[in-house]
Image (spheres, rainbow, N blue to C red):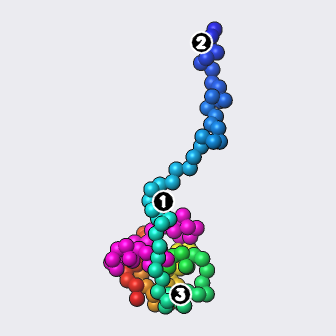
Amino acid sequence: MNDEISNRFDPDRLRLDVGEVRAVVPERLKRRAQQFVKLPWTWISLLGRFTGPTWITAAHVLHLDWENKGQPFKLANGLLKIDGVSPQSKRRALRELARLGLISVEWRPRKSPIVLRLK
């Protein structure tokens, strides 16, 4: 009879204390929090009237351009999503940056756009 009792499902045995649960932050995000972006004054003056998603996208573009040494690069949604920029906002921001003459973009259906160059 003791075997029957010990084999019963007991949800209390599966509970975790709140103190035991910890958020795991990936190493890449830890390094990212220590990075910085240099903004040219021309970009600041042209972007002055825009909202957060455009600024965040512009900062990502500048950082990735530096990281890729001026070579074309894909602008994926992942890191922008972490900063609260939706794919639609990213698309609007890239179009605005291109309209202002700050970047050139290669648009690809159902794929990440490629930022060709900064101007």
Three-letter code, disc 2: Asp
Q: Read off the magenta span.
A: 59-87
Q: Check the image and report above or below for 76 versus 118.
A: above
Residue 5 visible within the image: yes
Q: Is residue 73 magenta?
A: yes
Magenta run includes residue 30: no
Numbered tag placed on residue 30 in the rendering: 1
In the rendering, which numbered label is found on residue 3? Answer: 2
Residue located at (37% from left, 73% from top): 67
Q: Residues within 10 Å of mark 1 (few under 14, many from 20)?
A: few
Residue under label 3, please give it. 44
- Circle 2 SS class: helix
How dense is the environment of label 2, judged by Cα within 10 Å: few (below 14), some, or many (20 and up)? few
Q: Is residue 74 left or right of residue 49?
A: left
Compare marks 2 and 3 and give the one earlier in the sequence.
2
- Local secondary structure at mark 1: helix
Label 2 close to label 1 by CB (< 8 Å): no
Identified by mark 3, the residue type is: Ile
Number of numbered discs on residues: 3
